[in-house]
Amino acid sequence: MRVRIRLSGGKDNPTVRFRALPICEDLGRRGWDVGIWSGTEEADVIVLQWGAFDAQKASAKAPWVIFDCNDAVFLDELAWQGNAGDNLCFVDYFLGASPRITEHLERRFGKHRVSYIPDVVEPHWFDLHPQPHDGMRLIWTGMHDNLHLFEIMRPALEELARRRDFTLVIVTSTHGSDKKSNAERAASLPCPVDFYPWSPEAIRREVARADIGLAPLPANEWCTCKSPNKPAMFGAGLLPVVVSDIPSYRELTDDGKLGAIARDPGEWVTELEALMDDPERREREGHLLRERVRRLYSRERIADLWETALTELTEWHPH
């Protein structure tokens, strides 16, 4: 079977790193003919990432079209309404990148046309070992325009800074799409901050030197649909996590059994203080979370899920 994937961007794009290139490599090792779609070649299955606007074009090149759907559908140019009607009628099957996205898809298109496939956690995270460092270090990392999501932490950070000594480590791009400095935005937070420009090497280095991973998100539908990739990466790197209450984070932490879920500033302060004061708990939860991440999001498991979805598509949706 010839499977081709339309990429959503360059090699540093998260969807490409976590949902496209690993699948091409891993399914290829299993004997599948998987590669990147040129936009013109014919295939048996074409997988569309980053919107379904090419669905009609893809349907002329392949008998089966899959829409691999993540929270990008909430972007203005890819909004749900923009992907409706003429575009989605050419899609045969849907992949949801998070539990909440999958719920949306199942409600709209039926469970028989939808599979939940999380993002891959890259294998090198499972080999990461903590490195010596001074003081308590909390870490957050994100894309160039996502630092504003951290604003919900401002009241908790202000209170925590009055009660504890710590440094907040932020790894993100130097500027947002508005050209404003993310280092200046980070410096405005009410606690000591170490800012590092985003790179794979910087994230890996700083996770190894951190004590607790943070994944705060505002309470809106876009954020509720996000995947667990950020705290899953922290967990694979042996960090305990404190996260907002969204479905993918509940899945990752086993409903808070392997990490703390915080719903308001008071809970953020309480949960962070509890972890700060208990190094044995931090080490224990870090190791347990690494094993859960390995079970749920390793390349081997995600490749299994893709094989199941592709087999189900061709067996249950014959053309």
Image: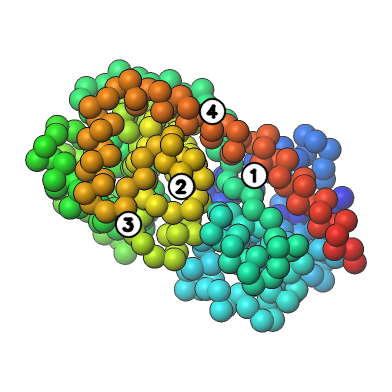
The residues tagged by marks 1 and 2 sit, at their Cα atoms, a distance apart of 24 Å
Disc 3 and disc 4 in contact, CB within 8 angstroms: no
Looking at the image, residue 266 sits to the left or right of residue 62; the answer is left
**Chain-order first, disc 3 or disc 4:** 3
Kind of residue sitting beneath label 3: Leu
Disc 3 designates what residue? Answer: 149
Q: Which mark is residue 299?
A: none
The residues tagged by marks 3 and 4 sit, at their Cα atoms, a distance apart of 28 Å
The residue located at (33%, 20%) in the rendering is: 280
Question: Is 287 situated above or below 122?
Answer: above
Question: Is 5 situated above or below 278?
Answer: below
Q: Position of residue 3 (x, y in %)?
A: 79, 52
Looking at the image, residue 150 sits to the left or right of residue 245; the answer is left
The residues tagged by marks 1 and 4 sit, at their Cα atoms, a distance apart of 23 Å
Q: Quadrant of residue 282?
A: top left
Label 1 neighbourhood size at 10 Å, few (<14), some (14-19), many (20+)?
some
Q: Position of residue 313 (x, y in %)?
A: 81, 57
Kind of residue sitting beneath label 4: Glu
Q: Nearer the viewer, residue 201 or 217?
A: 217
**Chain-order first, disc 1 or disc 2:** 1
Disc 4 designates what residue? Answer: 291
Disc 2 designates what residue? Answer: 249
Label 4 neighbourhood size at 10 Å, few (<14), some (14-19), many (20+)?
some
Disc 1 designates what residue? Answer: 21
Dot 3 falls on a residue whose secondary structure is helix
Q: Nearer the viewer, residue 36 or 289?
A: 289
The residue located at (70%, 68%) in the rendering is: 110
**Chain-order first, disc 1 or disc 4:** 1
Kind of residue sitting beneath label 2: Tyr
Q: Position of residue 2 (x, y in %)?
A: 84, 52
Comparing marks 3 and 1, which lies closer to the viewer?
3
